[in-house]
Amino acid sequence: MRTYGNFATHQLARRGLERASGNPNDVDREDYEVGPEGKGDADFIRASFGENLECMGQGTVFERGVRLDQVKCDGSGMFDAARFLSPFKPEGVDLRHSRFGLNLSLRDARLVGDVDMSMSHVTRRLVLTSSRFRQDCILRGAEIGLLEIEGDKLPFKRARLDLRECRFYRFLGDKAMALELAQAQDPGKFSRDPYLQLENYYGSTGDDVTSKRIHHQGRSDLRENAKDKRRGVTEWSGPARWFDWIKWLTGYGVKTPYLLVWIGA
């Protein structure tokens, strides 16, 4: 395992990592595992950072893959405004099983290839505000203290999002964005998990109206996924489909006036 204190990259050439410095001592280029002529992946597998890992700014460009799986960072991982340019499947951003003691920030980052954060752990805050994902974004099994997506642009407009078994305990962003996040899931990897996380969060803040709205939308979207024969993955038995008419009577338990209207009719 390679161990660093605070680590900051000051310049990354398009062919690979060109120069870096740590604190208090410089980190040699040999600390990176890159391919011939510096054209390989930036490889930090199982590395340990005692403070922060900082690769920020528009001048920070990764032209090949970035391997951060099983990284342990006691501070924050800061990739604000960085550019991850490789569109190829084997050369995405790999953060599987990584652990950040504070935050992981991808604010205003551009991620052209796949980003895999499955089973990652971010103690405080995962910042995705103004970031852009172009291909797969996998957060399956991730655990996040607070998920931040502020502004009016969802980062996953052109990406396939996997939120199965993802747990985040708080959400920072407007309510429309929260619902848009849950509905941005890849239909082939659909789960009620993000709806349940948001439902619990808004319920814990005393916002029962939003909590019930998300509960209802989650059940409705589950139903629609079950009806999608081409892309959906939800499987319902015959009885489950037959009893789905309860939706129209009770609004899945949160819109009971529907039932009164039906009885009055």
Image: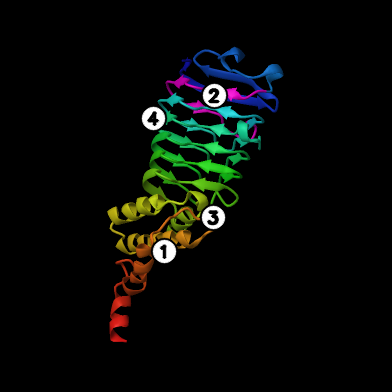
Among numbered discs 2 and 1, the one appearing first in the sequence: 2
Residue for point 60% across, 12% down: 30
Residue 8's disc number: 2
Q: Which residue is mark 1?
A: 220
- The region drawn magenta spans 40-60
Say which of marks 3 and 2 sits in front. 3
Q: Secondary structure at mark 1?
A: helix
Q: Quadrant of the C terminus?
A: bottom left
CA gap, disc 2 to disc 1? 46 Å
Q: Position of residue 192 (x, y in %)?
A: 40, 53
The answer to whether residue 186 is visible is no
Q: Position of residue 111 (x, y in %)?
A: 60, 39
Q: Name the amino acid type tagged 3.
A: Arg
Q: In this rendering, which labeled residue sits more in front, label 4 or label 2?
A: 4
Sequence order check, earlier mark of 1 and 3: 1
Q: On the rendered structure, is 218 left or right of 129?
A: left
Q: Where does label 3 land, which residue?
A: 231
- Of badges 2 and 1, the one in the foreground is 1
